[in-house]
Amino acid sequence: MSDLRKAEVTTRQNFKMLENSLESQTADDQKHLDDEKAGKATAEEDKATAEKDLDVTVNELKSVTEQLATARGSCLQTAADHEASTAARKEELEVIAKAKQIIKESTSGAESKSYSLLQMMRSQADLAGSEVVAVVKRLAKQQKSPALAQLASRIMGMMRHRSSGDVFGKVKDLIQDMIGKLEKEADADAEEKAWCDEQMSKTAAKKGDLEDDLERATARIDAADAKSAKLQEELQALAGELSALKKEQAELDKIRAEEKADYDVAKSDLEQGLTGVRKALAVLQEYYGAASASMLQDEQPAKPEGFQKASGAGGSIVDILQTVESDFATNLAKVEAEESDAQSDYEKVTQENAVVVTSKEGDQKYKSQEVKSLGKTAAEYKGDRDTAKTELAAVNEYYGKVKDRCIAKPETYEDRKARRVAEIAGLKQALTILENEAAFVQRRHRGHGFLHAA
């Protein structure tokens, strides 16, 4: 039975060790599976972010395309309006010239007495100059432009002193110079606006990406720290359980040692007593051997003469010693059985404790490795977060400079563009007036010269 119990304990130990190995392998496989799932979740998160960014970009592209179409429509409408205005003004000037021609042909006598051709030309020039000055002044007032107000003053001064050279040519040069200056400023503003839009868009996108990276790294660090803290708690619990098991095993070893010592003493005493009783029985049985047979027959009166053995008393002693021998033998067998059972129970509990300790030490080793791996992973995430913070700080600084340059202005680009378009259109209108008047004056001069020649 002892051999069977030992074989059973060994088999159970082997089974527990195999079971522990399989559980450890299962836990490791489960960990790899969890890592793969986490990687898949991260990839899906990145995919969702990319799709969201794509949607935002598509919407922005759609909005910009619509704005471009609106701007093109506005520009085409403005150009059409300007051409219509120019054509109408030209037609008006032609009608006026035709009316003047009719008046001249029908009222030549009255004209010579009341007005001269030079006076009419001067009046026409005064009218054109006044109209140009009025157009430029109105434009300066509408756009609140000191430069246009100064240009109007210079035109007015030049018109007052028409005797000095070609006044219309000089005024046209002034207006064309102003138009060129405004067009250069408009081109510079357009380049600045394109640069600002590009930099603002790129910087905002980079800023958003870095903020997402920073948030993602922070979330991963928090998750790693939380899991590491949980594993640390589990490791502390395992350490406490292992300490309690080892303490319990030490107490069990001590009790087993004490029981074994008591058993050795009891066995020695019982074996020694049993040996002594058996020797005494052998001596008594040898001495009372002959008398023992007669004691089985009917007792007869002893002969009074001579010495005889005390067979009755000796038999009683032998019976007592035989009872003592039986008790000693029974107690010895009982003590040996109890010792065997105690040893078997001790080995069983010890083996179970060893299996539990092995399993918990395996868990402790695995969790310690996982804590170390999480610490390394968290350190990498923290490095990524620090890098993202540094880059984000640089991007925010640059973004602030770009906003100061492109946004923090009293007048937006759209306002400046509209103002310059209006200024250029007004100046071109004034220039058209001068060109039409110059052509009319030239025709008048040619007609006047023909009359003098005739």
Image: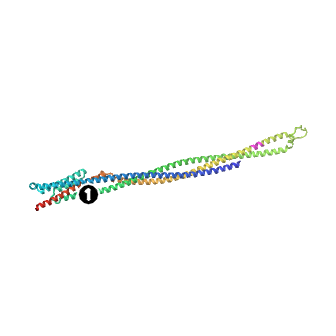
Residue 420 visible to an observer of this rendering:
no
Residue 185 location, quadrant: bottom left
Residue drawn at (46%, 50%), measured in percent from left and top? 218
Residue 269 percent location from the top left of the image: 74, 45
Residue 113 percent location from the top left of the image: 8, 55
Q: In the picture, which quadrant includes the C terminus?
A: bottom left
The segment highlighted magenta reads 325-330
Q: Vertical placement of 430 versus 251: above or below?
A: below
Q: Which colour scheme is used?
A: rainbow
Residue drawn at (58%, 46%), measured in percent from left and top? 241
Q: Vertical placement of 276 versus 195: above or below?
A: above
Residue 194 location, quadrant: bottom left
Give yes or no for residue 310 being in the magenta stretch. Answer: no
Q: Residues within 10 Å of mark 1 (few under 14, many from 20)?
A: few
Residue 285 location, quadrant: top right
Residue 177 percent location from the top left of the image: 24, 58
102 to the left or right of 347: left
14 to the left or right of 441: right
400 or 161: nearer the viewer: 161
Q: Main secondary structure of the magenta part?
A: helix
**Looking at the image, which residue sits at the far bottom?**
453
Helix, strand or loop status at disc 1: helix
Q: Which amino acid does label 1 sit on?
A: Lys
Label 1 sits on residue:
181
445 or 369: nearer the viewer: 445
446 to the left or right of 74: left
Residue 221 percent location from the top left of the image: 48, 51
Give yes or no for residue 328 being in the magenta stretch. Answer: yes
Q: How many labels does the image show?
A: 1
